[in-house]
Image (tube, grey):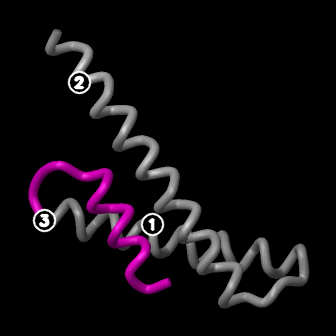
Amino acid sequence: MSTLPGMAALLLVRGPMLWTFAVASLLGAAVGVGGYMIAFFEEFPVGSTQTVTAAGIVAIAGVIRLSVAGVQRLRQR
């Protein structure tokens, strides 16, 4: 789980590396809290729930990245 928020931040942020680190920190905190809450309410194991939540964030970031790239390609035409 420790590298997944960084991967998502790299997919989302275009700019200085400082912004990437800030977004990765915020995503990591959100994944930690969100995964813990899901695990608490649904009675799942905490570590695996946080990892699945982080993987979901990476998947969402990938879809956003592909969508933005597609829109930019259409605008260039």
> Residue at point 64% right, 74% down?
52
Residue count near mark 2 (Cα–Cα under 10 Å), binned few <14, some 14–19, many ≥20: few
- Left or right, 56 with respect to 41, comes to left
> Residue at point 24% right, 70% down?
21
Of the pair 23 and 50, the residue shown nearer to us: 50
Question: Would you place residue 18 above or below residue 40 in this image?
Answer: above
Q: What x and y, as percent, mark residue 14?
A: 17, 49
Q: What x and y, as percent, mark residue 57?
A: 52, 60
Magenta stretch: give its range. Answer: 1-17
Quick one: quadrant of the C terminus? Answer: top left
Question: Would you place residue 43 above or below residue 67 in this image?
Answer: below
Tell me the distance, in whole angstroms, between the alpha carbons under discs 3 and 2: 22 Å
Name the residue that disc number 2 marks.
72
Mark 1 or mark 3, which is nearer the start of the sequence?
3
Residue 61 shown in magenta: no
The kind of secondary structure element at disc 2 is: helix
The kind of secondary structure element at disc 1 is: helix
Of the pair 58 and 23, the residue shown nearer to us: 58
Q: Nearer the viewer, mark 3 or mark 2?
A: 2
Of the pair 72 and 27, the residue shown nearer to us: 72
> Residue at point 23% right, 63% down?
20
Name the residue that disc number 1 marks.
27
Q: What x and y, as percent, mark residue 74?
A: 26, 15
Query: For the residue marked with disc 1, what is the amino acid?
Result: Leu
Q: What x and y, as percent, mark residue 50?
A: 63, 79
Q: Nearer the viewer, mark 2 or mark 1?
A: 2
Tell me the distance, in whole angstroms, between the alpha carbons under discs 3 and 1: 15 Å
Mark 2 or mark 3, which is nearer the start of the sequence?
3
- Give me the disc on residue 17: 3
Residue count near mark 1 (Cα–Cα under 10 Å), binned few <14, some 14–19, many ≥20: many
Question: Would you place residue 39 above or below residue 76 in this image?
Answer: below
Q: How many marks?
A: 3
